[in-house]
């Protein structure tokens, strides 16, 4: 996906009919990309010749564009909230569902890890308890002798 964005960025014309690109002005830079896919898959593009201001970082916008262009999910947990905001505002259709499904999957994984830790603590506590009981039995046997 970055190849698509990189090749679009090297093009100097933003309104060329053979390769129409659009510039997205982010909070920390700009991203230039082909306008046609954005026009048909999102509600972002109103006028293909003017730059569009997006109140998100370049990395978040690139991760969102990756999904728009390829349907690949290439974002991290910190970017999920911002991408969800872009999905709600501009689309594409289905991205919100993908984000929610991934959030549920991450939540399940976190709960599984917490349960494993609890089980590990329980096993450790039981082991310590058994060790203390064994030690107590040994002391009692010594006193009887």
Image (tube, grey):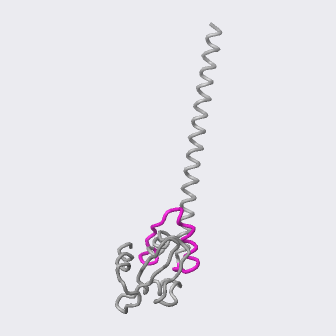
Above or below: residue 32 compared with residue 139: below
Give coordinates of residue 138: x percent, y percent.
60, 16
Residue at image x 37%, y 80%? Answer: 8
What residue is rendered at 53% in x and 77% in y? 94
Specify whether 75 is left or right of 4.
right
Q: Judge left or right: residue 79 versus residue 16.
A: right
Judging depth in this view, the residue of 113 and 23 nearest the camera is 23
Residue at 57% across, 59% down: 107
The residue closer to the viewer here, 126 or 61, is 61
User: Residue 47: horizontal and vertical position, in percent?
Assistant: 50, 90
Please tell me whether residue 111 belongs to the stretch shown in magenta: no
Quarter of the image with the C terminus is: top right
71 within the magenta span: yes
Relative to residue 50, is residue 114 drawn left or right? right
Q: Quadrant of the N terminus?
A: bottom left
Where is residue 140 shown, x and y percent of the image? Answer: 65, 14
Chain part drawn in magenta: 67-93
Residue 74 is situated, as x and y percent measured from the top left of the image, at 45, 67
Quadrant hosting residue 87:
bottom right
Query: As displayed, is residue 41 above or below residue 28?
Result: below
Front one among 144 and 51 = 51
Q: Residue furthest top?
A: 145
Main secondary structure along the magenta-highlighted residues: helix
Q: Nearer the viewer, residue 104 or 65?
A: 65
The residue that appears at 58% across and 73% down in the rendered structure is 85
């Amino acid at each position: 996906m970055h190849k698509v964005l990189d090749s679009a960025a090297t093009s100097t014309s933003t309104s060329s009919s053979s390769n129409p690109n659009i510039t997205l002005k982010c909070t920390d830079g700009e991203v230039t990309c082909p306008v046609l896919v954005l026009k048909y898959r999102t509600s972002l593009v109103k006028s293909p010749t003017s730059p569009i201001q997006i109140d998100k970082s370049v990395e978040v916008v690139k991760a969102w564009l990756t999904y728009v262009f390829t349907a690949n999910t290439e974002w991290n947990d910190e970017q999920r909230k911002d991408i969800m905001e872009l999905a709600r505002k501009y689309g594409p259709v289905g991205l919100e569902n993908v984000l929610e499904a991934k959030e549920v999957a991450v939540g399940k994984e976190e709960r599984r890890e917490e349960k494993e830790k609890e089980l590990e603590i329980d096993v450790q506590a039981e082991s310590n308890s058994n060790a203390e009981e064994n030690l107590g039995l040994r002391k009692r046997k010594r006193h009887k002798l």
